[in-house]
Amino acid sequence: MAELLLICAVLAFIELDTTYLGQVLISRPTVAGSIIGLLSGNFFLGLQLGIFTELIYLDFMPIGGVVPPSGAISCGVAVIMAQFFKVDIYFAFFVGIIGGLAFSFAEKELRRLRARILPQQEKALKENKTTAACVLFQSLLLQFLAVYAFLLVCVSVIGPVFGGISAKIPEHLHMAFKFSYFVVPWIGLAGLLLSFSAKPKSD
């Protein structure tokens, strides 16, 4: 249990790299998956899930106010499901994808919360009641705790439930998810090739 809590904390810290802190690309699914896999005792599991997640999200364009799914959360949840709750990797992968999509909605609510408290923080800064460093630390701490809480709820609810029903899943669903999982890299690579081969239209 302590190891799982630590891994969730590390994953929450890695998620900060997406837009809030550093942006040194440790939140890319391939890197994040490898780190979580290494910490959980199965580096190659994390690497594989990270690469597959990377291929799914590689061509996702966060245009306008769209909050993209979190690749770090997706592959992290997938690794946790597979390693700690012994969920089959092809089920774990899609559980992770759902987790990443669900977090995008939570992230949208967090941004709305920040927008509501921003005027108060600006007023406090103008009146010298706080410092920019303090505001930045509070924002990062809020994001970290929110991601950590999301991960704890996700793994504590989905993990045991899925682990309990996995034995009752029909064989044809196992085959369908297994096939879908191994098709993922081909779909991702096809999208990547199309992106590279696309030529700009001439006037």
Image (cartoon, rainbow, N blue to C red):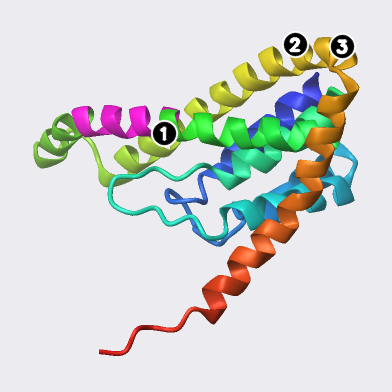
Q: Main secondary structure of the magenta part?
A: helix
Q: Tag 2's secondary structure?
A: helix
Total of numbered circles in the picture? 3
Of the numbered discs in the image, which one, if any, rests on residue 161? 2
Q: Amino acid at mark 3?
A: Lys
User: What residue lies at 36% left-to-right and 33% top-to-bottom?
Assistant: 108
Q: CA distance from mark 3 to mark 2?
A: 12 Å
Which stretch did the figure color magenta?
A: 106-116
Residue 115 in the magenta stretch? The answer is: yes
Look at the picture and state if 186 lies above or below 132: below
Q: Is residue 156 left or right of residue 112?
A: right
Whether the residues at callouts 1 and 2 have beta carbons within 8 Å, the answer is no
Quickly name the residue at label 1.
107
Q: Is residue 176 left or right of residue 106?
A: right
Q: Nearer the viewer, residue 60 or 29?
A: 60
Q: CA distance from mark 1 to mark 2?
A: 24 Å
Task: Report the quarter where the N terminus lies.
Answer: top right
Q: CA distance from mark 1 to mark 3?
A: 34 Å
Q: Earlier in the sequence, mark 1 or mark 3?
A: 1
Task: Report the quarter where the C terminus lies.
Answer: bottom left
Q: Nearer the viewer, residue 118 or 161?
A: 161
Q: Tag 3's secondary structure?
A: helix
